[in-house]
Image (cartoon, rainbow, N blue to C red):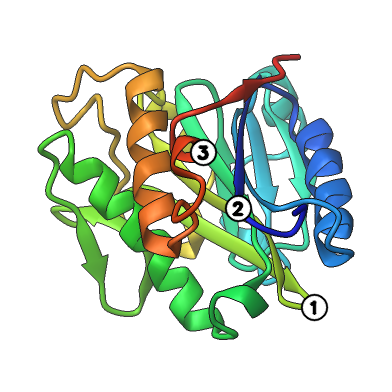
Amino acid sequence: MPGSGLAIRDLGRMRYGDALAIQQDLVEQRKQGRVPDQLLFVEHPHVITQGRNGRAENLLAGEAALRSAGIDYHATDRGGDITYHGPGQIVGYPILDLREWKRDVGAYVRAIEQVVIDALAQFEIIAGRITGCTGVWVDGKKVAAIGIHISRWVTSHGFALNHKTDLRYFQYIVPCGLTKPVTSMQELGSGSSREEVLAALSTSFAKQFRLNRDHQEAAFSYTETHS
């Protein structure tokens, strides 16, 4: 049945605009019940994205400086402020019909945070939340950002986990509008591979949203469509 289960795909490295087009297509298909819930993993080339609540002052570099650094810029319809994506970062885009889970935006955001928290625990990284600040944190430093969009209860956009991210690129922004430091799994001492982290996130995601009850293999099977 197209509308049941969970499909997980690793898109590899893909430009932000191309991944966004895939998301938008899958969102429309999910609304029509033509595909099951989706979880897309991707790694973007250097790009700064600004959410619909973003403030211009949180972008600390002009167009020329970004171009010189090889960084693209995209305005998006997700929630949140401004963030950076780049090599070494694991971005997850869940496309879920929340009518089949909970029609609760706050609960969905907390569940995404828990997915990352539980996955990090598999690598002996103790992560958690900071009251009033969306995302996942370790010792006051943000290791994962979250920004979502929901249309007719179907989700898009998602989370960005700093795995082996070059944190120097965050100098061009005030991440998510917060003057708090960022960190990465690598900086925290984890030597995990991308494949290991994808597997941990997939397992945690399926458990959190109970999407693997009749599709046990879905948590571990990827369709790779690298660009």
Is label 2 or label 1 in front?
2
Q: Position of residue 126 (x, y in %)?
A: 12, 49
Q: How many marks?
A: 3
In this rendering, the answer to whether 12 lies above or below 2 is: above
**Residue under the image location 42 percent in, 51 percent down:** 205
Q: Does any portion of residue 214 appear in the rendered image?
A: yes
**CB of mark 2 within 8 Å of CB of mark 1?**
no
> Is 174 left or right of 3, judged from the image as shown?
left
> Is 203 left or right of 209, judged from the image as shown?
left
Q: Secondary structure at mark 2?
A: loop
Which of 177/90 is in front?
Answer: 90
Amino acid tagged 2: Gly
Q: Secondary structure at mark 1?
A: loop
Amino acid tagged 1: Arg
Kindly report the distance in space between the C-alpha atoms of the residues bearing marks 2 and 3: 8 Å
> Is 14 left or right of 34, judged from the image as shown?
left
Q: Position of residue 116 (x, y in %)?
A: 34, 50
Quarter placement of the C terminus? top right
In this rendering, the answer to whether 111 lies above or below 124 is: below
**Residue under the image location 79 percent in, 51 percent down:** 35
Q: Earlier in the sequence, mark 3 or mark 1?
A: 1
Quarter placement of the N terminus? bottom right
**CB of mark 2 within 8 Å of CB of mark 3?**
yes
Amino acid tagged 3: Ala
Q: Secondary structure at mark 3?
A: helix
Q: Position of residue 213 (x, y in %)?
A: 44, 56
Q: Does any portion of residue 172 appear in the rendered image?
A: no
Extreme residue toward the bottom, this view: 104
**Residue ID for mark 3:** 218
**Residue ID for mark 1:** 152
**Residue under the image location 40 percent in, 67 percent down:** 111
